[in-house]
Amino acid sequence: MANRHVSGFHRLTAKGLAAFILVGATSAHANPEFSNDLQLVNSGIENNILIETPALNGSSASYGNSLQLRILGDHNGGLGDLWDNSAMFSGFARPGIVSQTGLDNEIVLNIAGNSNLFSALQSGQGNFLSGAITGFGNTAAVAQVGYGNRASFTQNGTGNALAISQTSW
């Protein structure tokens, strides 16, 4: 796996996967409590995702976020693709985008199969998402905004579609 820093983004590449991480101000801190944790396993080709950790509401950083992403298969994520059902996924992040803004959010995603589109967005604090997609041609989008939202899903098979939106204050 190659590891390069490019114009404010941290780029990781592995077997055709391109992941961009906007590290923002967190890269300047030496204190580990201001860090974000990324665990990325890719065993396939052309799995395209964009991973973001932008600052929250003009603050200096998003930190304490955790992302565990495991992709086994080919053509997953879908960065640059469009949702097949645009009405169902209206208002969600585009396929292939995983974004965490704020503090202490956690995402655990396991993808096994081919041509699965997914996105996840967390903004706020203490949100948790656990998801598993197994099969071919599935789509899943999750948006969690606010504090303490929790979601978990599993998709097995072919052509399943899922959209979850949670807002709390």
Image: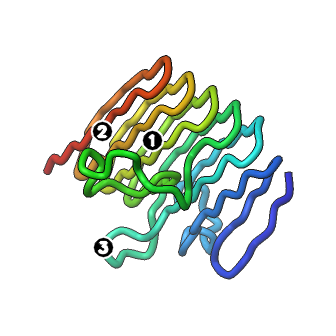
Residue that label 1 marks: 106
Q: Amino acid at mark 1?
A: Glu
| Labels 3 and 2: the sequence-earlier one | 3
Asked whether the beta carbons under mark 1 and mark 3 sit within 8 Å of each other, the answer is: no
Front-lying residue, 13 or 66: 13
Residue 33 spot, x, y in % from top left: 54, 55
Residue 41 spot, x, y in % from top left: 72, 38
Q: Residues within 10 Å of mark 1 (few under 14, many from 20)?
A: many
Dot 1: element: strand
Q: Is residue 81 positioned above or below 142 on the image?
A: below
Residue that label 3 marks: 57
Q: Which mark is residue 163?
A: 2
Q: Nearer the viewer, mark 3 or mark 2?
A: 2
Q: Quadrant of residue 159?
A: top left
Q: Quadrant of residue 154?
A: top left
Asked whether the beta carbons under mark 3 and mark 2 sit within 8 Å of each other, the answer is: no
| Labels 1 and 2: the sequence-earlier one | 1
| Labels 1 and 3: the sequence-earlier one | 3
Dot 3: element: loop
Q: Residues within 10 Å of mark 3 (few under 14, many from 20)?
A: few
Q: Label 1, label 3: how many angstroms apart (C-alpha)?
A: 19 Å
Q: Is residue 65 positioned above or below 138 on the image?
A: below
